[in-house]
Every structure is written in C-alpha cells, then in structure tokens.
Image (cartoon, rainbow, N blue to C red):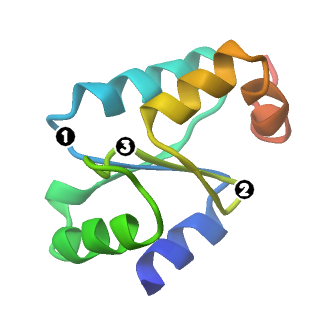
Amino acid sequence: MDKIQSLTSENAIVVFSKSTCCLSYAVTILFQELGVEPLIHELDHDPEGWEIEKALVNQGCNSPPVPAVFIGGKLVGSTNEVMSLHLRGALIPLIRPYQILA
C-alpha cells in the first residue's frame, strides 16, 4: 500500500498502532527510553486504517497486526520481534543511526 511505503520511507522508525493497544504503547516507550522518537501512526484514527491493517497482514505482520514496527524502511515485526532483538542486543545497532544525541 502506498501509504505504508510513503510513511516508512520518509521516517526512520514507524510504529503502526492503535490508540488502545498496550503492546504498541510498550514498544513506543522502549524506543523513547533508547533515545529514538518513532512516528506513531494510529490506525484507528486514520480513515484508511482498515486497509492499512490488511496490507500489514499481507506484508507478514502476525495477528494482531499491531504494533507493526519498521526501522529504516524495513519491516521488523511486532512486539515479540522487537523485544527479542532488544534482549539479544541486536536492536540498538539497528536504531543507533536514528538516536537523538543527549
């Protein structure tokens, strides 16, 4: 879908979310604690949200398809994938180019 492509190519880190999703909130807080400010795109606030959600499923996002995290334009996955990368020490190297210097 063009909107996914546009958002993920124009922003370093994108989290497709729903405003009521606690897992999306947890991923967002993790990124903020690690010094990055992802673009949060709330599907339930977007008129095209349902179509975007279907497109995310077609791209390989598990059920439920949110949060769907993209880093550097590439789909990383959902909460499980992000947390697994973090626990293995592989998340910080992915986000390092996008960290805000303190």
Q: Mark 3 falls on what kind of element?
A: loop
* Disc 3 and disc 1 in contact, CB within 8 angstroms: no
Task: Give the residue at x 23% y 58%.
Answer: 43
Viewer-nearest residue: 83 or 10: 83
Q: Mark 3 packing: few (<14 Cα in 10 Å), some, or many (20+)?
A: many
Residue lying furthest bottom: 2
Can you tell which mark lies on residue 72? 2
The amino acid type, in three-letter code, at marker 1 is Ser
Of mark 1 and mark 2, the one earlier in the sequence is 1
Of mark 3 and mark 1, the one earlier in the sequence is 1
Q: Mark 1 falls on what kind of element?
A: loop
- Is 40 placed above or below 55 here? above
Residue that badge 3 annotates: 67
- Is 83 placed above or below 72 here? above
Distance, label 1 to label 2, CA atoms, is 23 Å
The percent position of residue 65, horizontal first and vertical second, equals 31, 52
Q: Which mark lies nearer to you, 3 or 1?
A: 3
Distance, label 3 to label 1, CA atoms, is 10 Å
Q: Mark 2 falls on what kind of element?
A: loop
The percent position of residue 73, horizontal first and vertical second, equals 67, 63
Quarter of the rendering occupied by the N terminus: bottom left
The amino acid type, in three-letter code, at marker 2 is Gly
Quarter of the rendering occupied by the C terminus: top right
In the displayed structure, does residue 81 sit left or right of residue 99? Answer: left
Residue 35 shows in the view? no
Q: Mark 2 packing: few (<14 Cα in 10 Å), some, or many (20+)?
A: some
Residue that badge 1 annotates: 19
